[in-house]
Amino acid sequence: MKDLAWVPQSCTLPMQELPLRVAEWDALFSDRLTSLSRPHPLHLRLYLAGGPGVEDLVRDLVGRESGCCSFFTFTTAPGEELIRLDISVDQAHETVLETLASRAAAVGGRP
C-alpha cells in the first residue's frame, strides 16, 4: 500500500512495521476471504475459508492488531469450514473501517 495517510494517529504500530502488517492482512484477504458485508457502518463482517491453522493465524493477527489499534474490536466465530471475523469501530474511526473493507474487497476479489 503506497498511501498510508488513512492510518489514524492513535495507531501505535511503528511506521516501519506498518507495510508488513498490511501485507499480512492482504495475504489473509487474498488467500481466505470468501465474503464480506457491512451490517452497520461501524461493523464489518468477513467470512474466511477455514483449514488447518487458519483460526490460530486469524487470532494471532487480530490480537496483534488490537495491541496497536485499540479502536478496533474483533470477534471471531470459528467454524469447521468458515471463520467469521467481525470488526467494529467507534464513530471516530468509521473511515478506517471503510478503508479496511475496501482493501479486503479489492485484495480478496470481492465486490
Image: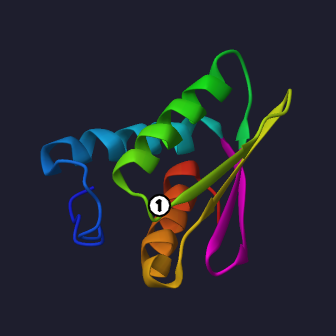
Point out residue 10 in the picture as x, y percentages from the top left corner: 28, 67
Q: Which residue is mark 1?
A: 103
Which amino acid type is marked by label 1?
Answer: Arg
- Residue farthest along the left direction in this orientation: 16
Q: Is residue 3 above or below residue 95?
A: above
- Seen at 50% across and 70% down, the residue is 97
- Seen at 86% across and 26% down, the residue is 80
Task: Give the magenta part as a residue range.
Answer: 33-47
- Seen at 33% across and 42% down, the residue is 21
Point out residue 85 in the picture as x, y percentages from the top left corner: 68, 49
- Seen at 74% across and 29% down, the residue is 50
Point out residue 23 in the picture as x, y percentages from the top left corner: 35, 41
SS at mark 1?
helix
The magenta stretch spans residue 3: no
Residue 77 quadrant = top right
Q: Is residue 32 above or below residue 88?
A: above
Of helix, strand and loop, which mostly describes the magenta segment? Answer: strand
- Which colour scheme appears in the figure? rainbow
Q: Nearer the viewer, residue 80 or 67?
A: 67
Q: Nearer the viewer, residue 111 or 1?
A: 1
